[in-house]
Image (cartoon, rainbow, N blue to C red):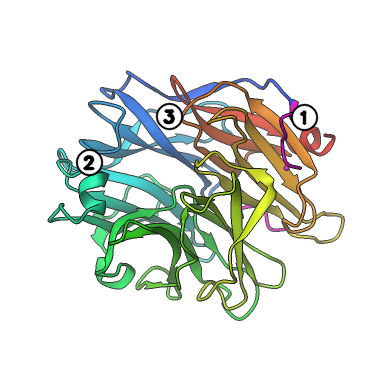
Amino acid sequence: MHRFTAAIISTFLLSVSVRAEELPIFTNGTGDCHTYRIPSLITAANGDILAFAEARKNGGGDAGDIDIVLRRSTDAGKTWNALQTVWDDTSNTCGNPCPVVDAKSGAIHLLLTWNSGAEHEGDIRSGKAPLGRRPYHTVSTDHGITWTKPTDISAQADRSEWRWYATGPGRGIQLAHGAHSGRFVIPANHSRADGTYDAHAIISDDGGASWHLSDPLGDGANESCVVELPDGALLFNTRMQTHSQGTRATARSTDGGEKWTPLIHEKALPCPRCEGSLLRWSFSSAGEKSILLFCNPAGPGRSNITLRASLDEGTTWPHSLNIFARKGPGYTALTPLSGDNIGVLHETPSGIVLQAIALSTLLKQ
């Protein structure tokens, strides 16, 4: 079984609600930081749970002095070690953590983005930011304790006509099946000179030594997530920043993420222009069901964070739990904890918290 690896909510019917303990992981106003945002969650090869975030030092905005920070749990999310800084580039913006674990070596490859702290997204998108926004890559070979100096991979993973750029946020994947087994696929997004957003993947076939780009998904696509299907095909799930129908959109690839089918708007997955997270919980095997998990705010606005399960590779999402009803920033991240517990790391108005949701509870809904 691969472990490291929910029906549209209408105005008349909300998903079943559950109240699980909210364990604070990154609390606004602590650690010499005004606001923590943009969660990412992954399980290291040694079983440690790693929670990443942006530490927005002086305010809640997307620009300025922003560091990448990390906390670690060695007991399946029950307790957490002290805050660790992964990347602090003085007053500049280091953001959008998107890690992937190499199943062969155990190394963690972390994709990030950088821009001058003085340059805001509007400046970058309008072409008024001379330094622009750039993708970076860092590696840990000791399960996230230490990290290499981040390396600019713009020459391989960016295009001169793109302006805004963001990796993930969330997590990348490593393919386990088919002709491209071992390949890293990292979801990312960008904007063009006409202001249009689009999404793409960053791909490596040599364990992170080099990278190349997939074709773009389609106009309006933005922050995205990706899973592998049993036959080695990929399912890409994206926020639609423009051309939105109030839902997520998906595309598929049969060549390891190089090219994508046209975007389809998913009526079963409402989305208020916000990030969402997708996780392969299990592949079908002896005694096991094939299960995909998806989590995002179902709305109205960025309220009602809902965890969903699909048993048919994302065709339908019949099981859902409302795990956080209040309105907030709304970004989420998922990873397995212990037993059948799903770790949901998500934003709230006071910071980033972890909730442990039993898969058996979700599948009863």
The kind of residue tagged 3 is Asn
Kindly check if marks 3 and 2 are in contact, taking CB atoms under 8 A apart as contact.
no
**305 within the magenta span:** no
**Residue at image coords 61%, 59%:** 250
**Residue at image coords 15%, 52%:** 129
SS class of the residue under badge 1?
Answer: loop
* Farthest-out residue, bottom: 179
- Give x and y (percent) for residue 272: 54, 38
Report how far apart the C-alphas of labels 1 and 2 lie in the structure: 45 Å
- Crowding at dot 3, Cα within 10 Å, few <14 / some 14-19 / many 20+, comes out as few
The kind of residue tagged 2 is Asp
Q: Which residues are magenta?
A: 1-16
Can residue 107 be seen at all in this image of the molecule? no
Foreground of the two, 40 or 83 = 40
Residue denoted by label 2: 88
**Residue at image coords 36%, 58%:** 190
Determine whether 117 is above or below 250 in the image: above
**9 within the magenta span:** yes
Give the left or right position of residue 142, taking residue 115 as reference.
right
Can residue 218 be seen at all in this image of the molecule? yes
Residue denoted by label 1: 13
- Give x and y (percent) for residue 59: 26, 26
Determine whether 351 is above or below 279 in the image: above
Give the left or right position of residue 351, taking residue 269 as reference.
left
Mark 3 or mark 1, earlier in chain: 1
The kind of residue tagged 1 is Leu
Report how far apart the C-alphas of labels 3 and 1 lie in the structure: 40 Å
Residue denoted by label 3: 81
Tell me the chief SS of the magenta region.
loop
